[in-house]
Image: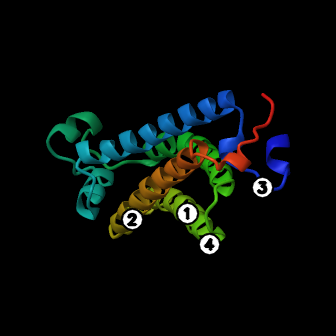
Amino acid sequence: MRYYTGSGFRLARLPHGLRLILTLYLLITLLGFWVAGGKYVVRGLLGPDGIAKYYLGEATGGDALLTGSTTKGVGFLIDVTHPHLFTVPLVLLVLCHLVQLCERSQRLKNVLYLMSFGGLFLTFGLPWVMRFAPWAGIGISIGGSALLLSGSIMCVLPLRDLWRRLPAKDKTRADG
């Protein structure tokens, strides 16, 4: 915490080892977001219709082999929702803290925070109402896109600040 309490803090001032750890975390997290997005492409869940078919048990082709052809019941939804409600908020918490340390406007940061957590709520909350409101596929599609976009941006912004060149007068680094 001593790195963050002084005035004029910059991510680029962190010790090299800490910058390396954060860089590896951010790159793996960015990859995770895009692999999760790829899952939607492979399963044909890019549009509201495909999402509705998936959750209503009307999947066709290769996805029917993966998911079966029955409506996704409470057990399925719990199995999908439970781990995501523990892990995704933790990842977002870390990313939000790193973004908070970036040299960007607070307004942009707040938009990213709201986009990411809003995307989380839509993506993992709306499948619970899909059986009763098939229009929820639109919200899941919007939520997944918002989560992918905001999560990616929240990985890239700190990466840029971590390895940005500092002016010569500003190169003092914390001991590490």
Q: CA distance from mark 3 to mark 1?
A: 23 Å
- Please tell me whether mark 4 sits on a helix, a strand or a loop: helix
Q: CA distance from mark 2 to mark 3?
A: 37 Å
Q: CA distance from mark 4 to mark 3?
A: 20 Å
Going from N to C along the chain, the mark reached first, 4 or 1, is: 4
Identity, as a three-letter code, of the amino acid under mark 3: Gly
Q: Is residue 64 above or below residue 100?
A: above
Going from N to C along the chain, the mark reached first, 2 or 3, is: 3
Name the residue beneath numbered marker 2: 142
Q: CA distance from mark 2 to mark 1?
A: 15 Å
Q: Is residue 176 above or below residue 55?
A: above
In the image, 98 versus 45, the foreground residue is 98
Residue 169: image x %, image y %?
A: 73, 49
Q: Residue at x 49, y 52 (%)?
A: 151
In-image side of 153 versus 49 (left or right): right
Q: Name the quadrant of the N terminus.
A: top right
Q: Which numbered tag is attached to residue 94?
A: none
Q: Residue furthest front?
A: 168
Name the residue beneath numbered marker 4: 107
Name the residue beneath numbered marker 3: 8
Name the residue beneath numbered marker 1: 112
Mark 3 Cα-neighbour bin, 10 Å: few <14, some 14–19, many ≥20: few
Q: Residue at x 25, y 47 (%)?
A: 41
Residue 148: image x %, image y %?
A: 42, 53
Going from N to C along the chain, the mark reached first, 2 or 1, is: 1
Going from N to C along the chain, the mark reached first, 4 or 3, is: 3
